[in-house]
Amino acid sequence: MSTNDRLDFCRRLAADAGRLAHSTFGRAAVLPAKGRHDEVTAMDREVERVVRERIARAFPQDAVLGEEDGASADVGSAEFVWIIDPIDGTANYARGIAHYCVSIGVLHRGTPFVGALHDPSHERLYWAARGAGAWLDENGATRRLAVSPIATLDGATVECGWSLRVPQADYLALFARMLSAGCAVRRAGSGALGLADVAAGRTEGYAELHINSWDCAAGLLLVAEAGGRINDFFAGDGLLAGNPILATNATLADSLATLAGIPFR
Ligand code: LIP
């Protein structure tokens, strides 16, 4: 199988999964939360079920890791691992806020290989392959993505992801450091779309003190292939346990790494 086979399949799968997710947007069947501010809907589970089924048929030799149903037994040994967030931004989805996406990334021997991210609310399909650039299909056209050229912190916008997975004091300190340096700071509730914004040059950075691999596997590749700099998220047990994440444009990379306290490789 070539890169193109998995890339083409990943793009089609993310497109189909996003359309499925959007079919109940605004009337989501919200299930008992996994934790405070950690929602899940029936559609999260349905999208992941469908995505897993299609991957198993097309690439039975590949491993899978998904937010809702966990890791297949061969996730530590398989050459290729598919990483699925069926709905990233579930809290937004559950509330009818049109800021969510389906994110599907593929690792080859532990590093991002191809990925696709579908934002059905805006009919945007982001995709990338290692060494082949990052791209956006929108309004019937495909354009290459490039990170922002902004070179000053007081001109930068940075998204700082939040969850109860880290102490609130640490998050507030991160937020305060960014603000004190002159950055505009946002938190929109989807790490994957936050990474897509960096890749598309809409923001200059995305930082989060802990994020899971299913939130970011596709988005990290988008940023790297759009000319940005990313930290070594998959170091250690990043795949199964998550890690801090920093994804930036090239120009402000070192400054944002210092402010975030998240070093690059
Ligand atoms: C979301 C992440 C985001 C985080 C949110 C939430 P989910 O993922 O993408 O980085 O800040 O709290 O965890 O749970 O919507 O798939």
Image (cartoon, rainbow, N blue to C red):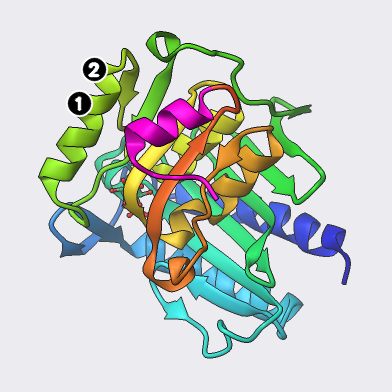
User: Does 155 appear above or below 205?
Assistant: above
Classify 10 Å Cα crowding around label 1: few (below 14), some (14-19), many (20 and above).
Answer: some
Question: What residue is rendered at 54% in x and 36% in y?
Answer: 196
User: Does 170 appear above or below 153?
Assistant: below
In which quadrant of the rendered view does residue 212 lie? bottom left
Label 2: which secondary element: helix
User: Which amino acid, mark 2?
Assistant: Ser
Q: Is residue 154 left or right of residue 203?
A: left
Q: Name the one closer to the observer, 135 or 227.
A: 227
In which quadrant of the rendered view does residue 159 lie? top left
Q: Name the one closer to the observer, 181 or 222.
A: 181
The range drawn in magenta is: 252-265
Residue 263 is covered by the magenta coloring: yes
Question: What residue is rendered at 43% in x and 16% in y?
Answer: 156
Q: In the rendered structure, are the residues bearing label 2 and label 1 in contact, judged by CB atoms less than 8 Å apart?
A: yes
Q: Which residue is mark 1?
A: 176
In which quadrant of the rendered view does residue 95 lie? top left
Q: Is residue 8 visible?
A: yes
Q: Which residue is mark 2?
A: 180
Q: Is residue 99 visible?
A: no
User: Which amino acid, mark 1?
Assistant: Ala
